[in-house]
Image (cartoon, grey):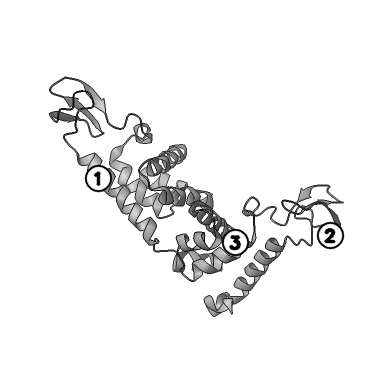
Amino acid sequence: MIYELAPAELHDEFKAFHHNLEKIASQHVEVCPFCKNTKFYKVRSKPTKTYRCKACHKYFTASTNTPFRRLVPFNELEVIFISRIKNISYNNIAKQLDISLAKVIRRECAIINYLKNNYPSLHNWYTHKKQTTLIPTLEQQYKIIKDKVTNLLGEQNQTCIYCGSNETTKVGNRACYRCRCCRHSFNILRDTSLNHIPKPELWLQFIDLIVSGTNNLQIAKTLNLHNDTVRKWRSNWCKMMKYWHCDALAIWCKYKEEDNN
């Protein structure tokens, strides 16, 4: 039985959540999610079954008012949930379902969000017991990003982009340099997302926080930044991760933000 995958005290929540996933996958509805009226009629069958309530006249589907409303086909959700409990990697799940890595991560984040709002005990066990360690792909990309940033901030002599000379001097604590030969100044991050992120002394700490799943409000308090600044930084860092070919980590950080909102 799949319920044996969770501790005994969580079996009731596990069964309830699993039943909800089955209802969403089969697109079965019993009441209007808006007014709880039981009288409604079907107006469309594809791509998802859509209904209209006879009382409030609103349209709805089996996934209305859930994080799964745009994640068709819904039968993938149960597979991802059970697979992750069994510690099956994202890559293997993606191969099994023949979907992209991004879709797997997005769907798991939606599952975590749904658990957080409806089954707090199951959410706590699933996130803190099963997801505390990054999978190897994310761990490897996390190390790549940290190494790149560390080297970037510590590099004192960068090749001049104008004359190719190595006789350059770093200006300030960002990636700005002045060439002693041609006298040009240049910024190696000029055409990247990092050029829009100030305070490089906070970069490594910020990366640690977004990878760990810390929400924007907590990051803002920890680093003494405005919440809007944190949101922009997260967006720019996700772009930079993709620029450095760490797409899986970028997806992870992006959807962790959605999960925490």
Instruction: Please report whichever mark, 3 or 1, sits nearer to the chain's N-terminal start.
Output: 3
Question: What residue is shown at x 67% (from left), y 69% (from top)?
Answer: 19
In the figure, is residue 197 to the left or right of 201?
right
Label 2 sits on a secondary structure element that is loop
Q: Residues within 10 Å of mark 3 (few under 14, many from 20)?
A: many
Distance from disc 2 to disc 1, alpha carbons, whole Å, reads 59 Å
In the figure, is residue 6 to the left or right of 214?
right
**Which of 90 and 57 lies nearest the eye of the viewer?**
90
Query: Does residue 120 show up?
Result: no
Label 3 sits on a secondary structure element that is helix
Question: What residue is shown at x 37% (from left), y 45% (from top)?
Answer: 245
Per the rendering, the mark at residue 150 is 1
Find disc 3 in the rendering and name its residue: 77
Per the rendering, the mark at residue 38 is 2
Q: Do the residues labelled 2 and 1 touch (CB within 8 Å)?
A: no
**Image depth: mark 3 or mark 2 in front:** 3
> Residue 107 in the image: x percent, y percent?
56, 56
> Residue 193 in the image: x percent, y percent?
38, 35
